[in-house]
Image (spheres, coloured by chain):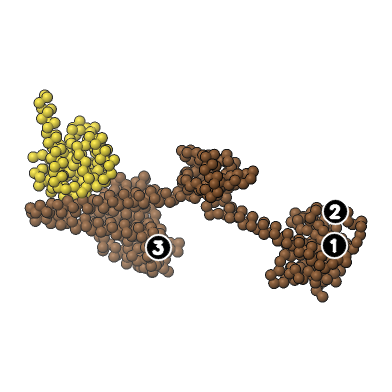
């Protein structure tokens, strides 16, 4: 089963994301800050990171930068999540190579679809790298 | 018969200008008063040259009728003194004299128009009409002078900036409001041009184009223009320009209104609305997402309970947020009604703590005398203390202290905690709505708490400020004492 790491500081939103993904047969790990997320990723590498933009302390975008600079984490697809619908944020997420950008509120189906797509994208990529070896 | 020298004189109701009569013989003064009575003038009298000079110090005189032959200082000598003083130089004199051919050349020596003469015995009608002509002239020039003064004062003291600008952009004349706005003295501005006081990024005002465009009477150009103060601070203004074709000195009139504050407020409101929308979106996202899950209908009872908790909490958050937004808007528009009454501070703090209990890991220390009575709005004080406490619980460490004391005739309440304190970069915006530091934890926080505290404090005649030292950050509320 694929593992998604949810990074979200609002407990109710975190619960909602977890429940929605678990119903879609996806295993979930959760963190309330970017710092806690880094610790969890070190312990077990997730298949996808579902990342809130506005976080206390290190922001979502700062975490993406950090992941991109780390050989172990650079390839993990990131789906950004925000309540801030400004288009420049979506552009910024795209520039940083994020897999997706979701503006809250998000329907459960759209969420599962976006995360599944990110998981598939990653396993396709993995398959390609296997065949090329 | 009246007394000899009379500086108060007779002032009939609605009297016109003041006329000074000078003669060493009292019966002549009385005769003159009688002759001039129909002209309804304010008449003052002097029986010597010395007295005449004294009278001129005390009164603003339109005309002097003076006998030439007087003991001591005669009429000519007195006139010489009068013409030497700047304050009295312009006053016309009519000499009254017996025929003396030798004296006529003396009259001609005086400035034409300022002096006239009548030979005794004079015809009352001629005297009256001569005096009437001089008084008329005086009143007309006085009216003109007053009107000029009034217009000049209107220019100098106009509440908005006004400048008369020459065709090359030179500032010919500026008023006080403009000097204050740009922090220059009048003489400094007089040496500068429009270009020199404009913001360097601003396009130059094309005066030769404006001159053609504004040539038609009543044509006005309006534009926004940024200027720089003497200290280099930007000032946003609205400038209305008209053109005056005044003989040899055509010029522009610029009316300059400072709109810096208005622009700032506009930007603030735009940011406020954007932030408010963003803050509303988070609880709405949880509520709509949870509703969508519930609709699927296959949740177990534990999951259902958790969904209900999320719905409750986010709905409350939404309500609080909307209430705070409304309160803040009312406060900013001055529509928030406060009722200043004596309030026992300790009672308010106790009831706030009941409604907003400290989290398990936080200890509260209270040092409040039950004697402290503040003159404030009870609801506002409740809100202020409540928001400061929530703030301390959220961002503080594990010890929160509430103190109150009478100080400088007022009352201060401090709420301090041993948390990390407000980050440096946040300090200038600490009391602005939605101002948040990087370390802010969002749980339940609307970003409006401190902004509300500030607005409530000001609306109730008090204030709030923040300081950080000795490992404690402290918010201090000040208010009036009811004792």
Is residue A121 among what the camera can see?
Answer: yes
Residue indicated by mark 2: B108
Q: Is residue B364 above or below residue A89?
A: below
Q: Which residue is mark 1?
A: B118
Task: Indicate the quadrant containing the C terminus of chain B: top left, top right, bottom left or bottom right.
Answer: bottom left
Chain B color in figure: brown
Mark 2 falls on what kind of element? helix
Residue B232: percent from left, percent from top = 49, 42
Residue B424 spot, x, y in % from top left: 36, 45
The answer, for residue B473, to whether it is visible in the render is no
Q: Nearer the viewer, residue B10 or B414?
A: B10
Secondary structure, mark 3, is: loop
> How far is the residue under mark 1 from the one under mark 3?
76 Å
| Residue drawn at 9 percent across, 54 percent down | B297
Chain ID, mark 1? B
Which residue is the site of mark 3? B460
Report the Cα–Cα distance between label 2 and label 3: 77 Å
Chain corresponding to yellow in the figure: A
């Amino acid at each position: 089963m694929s593992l998604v790491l949810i990074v979200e500081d609002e407990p109710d939103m975190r619960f909602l994301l977890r429940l929605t993904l678990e119903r879609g047969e996806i295993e979930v790990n959760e963190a309330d800050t970017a710092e806690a997320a880094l610790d969890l990723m070190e312990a077990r590498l997730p298949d996808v990171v579902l990342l809130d933009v506005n976080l206390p302390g290190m922001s979502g975008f700062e975490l993406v930068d950090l992941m991109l600079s780390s050989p172990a984490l650079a390839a993990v697809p990131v789906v950004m999540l925000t309540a801030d619908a400004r288009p420049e944020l979506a552009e910024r997420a795209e520039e940083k190579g994020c897999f997706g950008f979701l503006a809250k509120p998000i329907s459960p189906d759209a969420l599962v679809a976006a995360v599944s797509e990110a998981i598939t994208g990653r396993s396709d990529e993995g398959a390609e790298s296997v065949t090329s070896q | 018969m009246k007394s000899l020298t009379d500086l108060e004189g007779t002032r009939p109701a609605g009297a016109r200008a003041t006329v000074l009569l000078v003669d060493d013989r009292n019966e002549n003064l009385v005769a003159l008063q009688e002759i001039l009575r129909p002209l309804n003038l304010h008449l003052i009298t002097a029986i010597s040259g010395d007295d005449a000079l004294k009278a001129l110090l005390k009164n603003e005189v339109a005309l002097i009728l003076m006998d030439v032959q007087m003991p001591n200082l005669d009429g000519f000598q007195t006139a010489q003194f009068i013409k030497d003083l700047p304050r009295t130089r312009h006053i016309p004199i009519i000499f009254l004299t017996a025929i003396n051919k030798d004296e006529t050349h003396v009259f001609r020596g005086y400035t034409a128009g300022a002096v006239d003469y009548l030979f005794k015995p004079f015809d009352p009608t001629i005297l009256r009409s001569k005096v009437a002509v001089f008084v008329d002239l005086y009143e007309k020039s006085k009216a003109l002078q007053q009107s000029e003064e009034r217009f000049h004062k209107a220019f100098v003291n106009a509440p908005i900036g006004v400048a008369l600008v020459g065709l090359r952009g030179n500032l010919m004349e500026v008023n006080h409001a403009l000097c204050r706005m740009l922090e220059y003295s009048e003489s400094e501005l007089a040496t500068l041009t429009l270009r020199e006081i404009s913001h360097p990024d601003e396009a130059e005002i094309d005066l030769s184009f404006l001159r053609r465009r504004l040539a038609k009477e009543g044509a006005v150009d309006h534009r926004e223009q940024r200027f720089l103060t003497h200290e280099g601070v930007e000032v946003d203004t609205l400038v209305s320009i008209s053109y005056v074709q005044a003989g040899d000195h055509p010029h522009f009139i610029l009316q300059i209104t400072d709109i810096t504050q208005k622009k700032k407020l506009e930007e603030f409101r735009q940011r406020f609305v954007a932030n408010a929308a963003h803050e509303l979106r988070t609880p709405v996202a949880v509520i709509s997402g949870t509703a969508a899950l519930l609709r699927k209908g296959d949740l177990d009872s534990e999951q259902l309970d958790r969904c209900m908790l999320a719905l409750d909490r986010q709905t409350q958050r939404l309500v609080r947020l909307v209430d705070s937004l409304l309160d803040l808007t009312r406060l900013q528009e001055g529509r928030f009604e406060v009722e200043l009454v004596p309030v026992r501070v300790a009672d308010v703090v106790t009831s706030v703590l009941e409604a907003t209990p400290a989290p398990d890991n936080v200890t509260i220390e209270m040092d409040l005398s039950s004697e402290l009575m503040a003159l404030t709005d009870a609801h506002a004080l409740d809100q202020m203390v409540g928001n400061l406490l929530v703030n301390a619980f959220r961002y503080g460490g594990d010890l929160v202290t509430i103190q109150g004391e009478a100080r400088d005739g007022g009352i201060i309440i401090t709420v301090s905690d041993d948390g990390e304190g407000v980050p440096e970069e946040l300090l200038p915006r600490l009391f602005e709505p939605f101002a948040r530091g990087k370390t802010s934890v969002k749980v339940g926080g609307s970003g409006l708490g401190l902004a509300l505290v500030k607005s409530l404090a000001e609306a109730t005649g008090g204030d709030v400020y923040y300081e950080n030292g000795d490992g404690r950050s402290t918010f201090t509320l000040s208010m009036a004492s009811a004792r």
